[in-house]
Image (spheres, grey):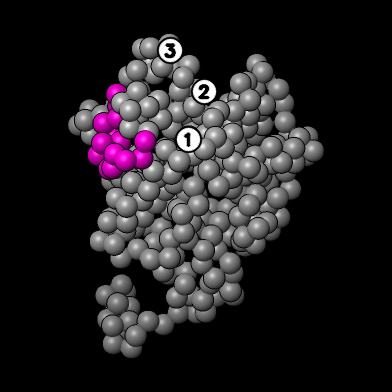
């Protein structure tokens, strides 16, 4: 049957039933700034792009979003490491290979040196608060990574993928938490602001005890933005299977807050490529 169908498609051209047009947001690729792409990012990029191409051919209005990791604790560590190397001036060019090596060294210093750790945490506050020096250094780091990512995207023929990283949602987070609280979903637990779901006993931590926000908050904000501002009828997340429980928790919180309505939130997972030890690759520990 497959052979006959493929032969017919080659002979007569692609035929399909036109779908009723939907606005579909696809979240794919999503590498981390300051790190080189790894095979999981390639898989997400290829699967997500194929899904986007197929849905476009079927007549849907497809929005392709690249939810890059461009925010959070790792930037506090990187900024501190670069500062201590006197490379904050903007005159020293950065490339993503340097940044990956810097990240490993910064992570080791963060774990071992309390002064470095305090300074790094202060840098996160400076970055999130919009201090000029922190924003400028952060933008240089992002630019170096983008340049490297684009080489890969050009090779794969990826077009129309719009970067909208975690930092995009930063200013929306307090309002999102307020909306969750208004829906009666928020609980204080050990000083942290949490949302408990029907998916896992562990909660989503939408605001940490120190007042900071992590990717639990960002991912909930992204769902809200996509179904309201982007007016998506369907949102598809192309991420490795290790993130499935987390994303199902995010979907559950959004549904219970009344944001989803008749819209679809789909998790399209793929397996992990593992090291020889049978464990997933960890770029932060180096040597991958």
Q: Give the range drawn in magenta.
A: 89-105
Is residue 153 visible in the rendered image? The answer is yes
Going from N to C along the chain, the mark reached first, 1 or 3, is 3
**Residue on which the image places disc 3:** 115
Q: Circle 1 sits on which residue?
A: 133
- Vertical relation: 256 (above or below) 86: below
- How far from the left and from the top, in percent, is residue 252? 63, 42
Contact between labelled residues 2 and 1, with CB atoms less than 8 Å apart: no
Q: Position of residue 108 (x, y in %)?
A: 32, 19
For numbered disc 2, what is the local secondary structure? helix
| Residue 103 covered by magenta stretch | yes
Residue 119 at x, y percent in the picture? 46, 19
Report the side of 115 relative to 59 (left or right). Answer: left
Q: Where is residue 159 in the image (x, y as percent from the top left)?
A: 38, 66
Crowding at label 3, few (<14), some or many (≥20) Cα neighbours within 10 Å? few
Q: Residues within 10 Å of mark 1 (few under 14, many from 20)?
A: some
> Which residue is at 43% across, 60% downward?
161
Task: Out of 87 and 150, give the one closest to the viewer.
Answer: 87
| Image position of 30 (left or right of 1) | right
Residue 148 lies, with reference to residue 247, above or below; the image says below
Vertically, is 60 above or below 262?
below
Q: Which of marks 2 and 3 is nearer the N terminus?
A: 3
For the residue labelled by badge 1, is the local secondary structure a helix, a strand or a loop? helix
Marks 2 and 3, how far apart at CA: 11 Å
The answer, for residue 273, to whether it is visible in the render is no
Badge 1 or badge 2: first in the primary sequence: 2
């Amino acid at each position: 049957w497959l052979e006959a169908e493929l032969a017919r498609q080659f002979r007569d051209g692609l035929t399909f039933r036109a779908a009723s047009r939907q606005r579909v947001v696809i979240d794919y690729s999503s590498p981390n700034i300051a790190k080189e792409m790894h095979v999981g990012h390639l898989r997400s990029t290829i699967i997500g792009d194929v899904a986007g191409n197929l849905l476009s051919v079927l007549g849907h209005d497809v929005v392709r979003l690249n939810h890059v990791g461009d925010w959070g604790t790792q930037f506090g560590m990187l900024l501190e490491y670069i500062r201590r190397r006197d490379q904050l001036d903007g005159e020293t060019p950065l490339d993503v290979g340097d940044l990956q090596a810097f990240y490993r060294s910064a992570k080791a210093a963060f774990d071992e040196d309390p002064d470095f750790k305090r300074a790094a945490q202060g840098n996160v506050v400076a970055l999130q608060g919009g201090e000029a020096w922190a924003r400028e250094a952060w933008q240089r780091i992002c630019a170096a990574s983008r340049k490297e990512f684009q080489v890969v995207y050009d090779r794969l023929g990826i077009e129309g993928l719009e970067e909208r990283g975690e930092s995009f949602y930063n200013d929306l987070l307090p309002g999102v938490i307020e909306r969750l609280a208004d829906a009666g979903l928020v609980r204080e637990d050990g000083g942290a602001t949490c949302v408990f779901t029907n998916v896992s006993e562990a909660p989503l931590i939408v605001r940490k005890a120190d007042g900071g926000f992590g990717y639990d908050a960002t991912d909930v904000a992204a769902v809200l933005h996509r179904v309201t501002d982007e007016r998506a009828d369907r949102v598809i997340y192309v991420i490795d299977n290790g993130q499935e429980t987390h994303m199902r928790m995010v979907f559950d919180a959004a549904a219970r807050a009344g944001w989803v309505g008749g819209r679809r939130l789909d998790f399209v997972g793929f397996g992990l490529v593992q090291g020889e030890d049978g464990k997933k690759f960890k770029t932060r520990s180096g040597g991958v």
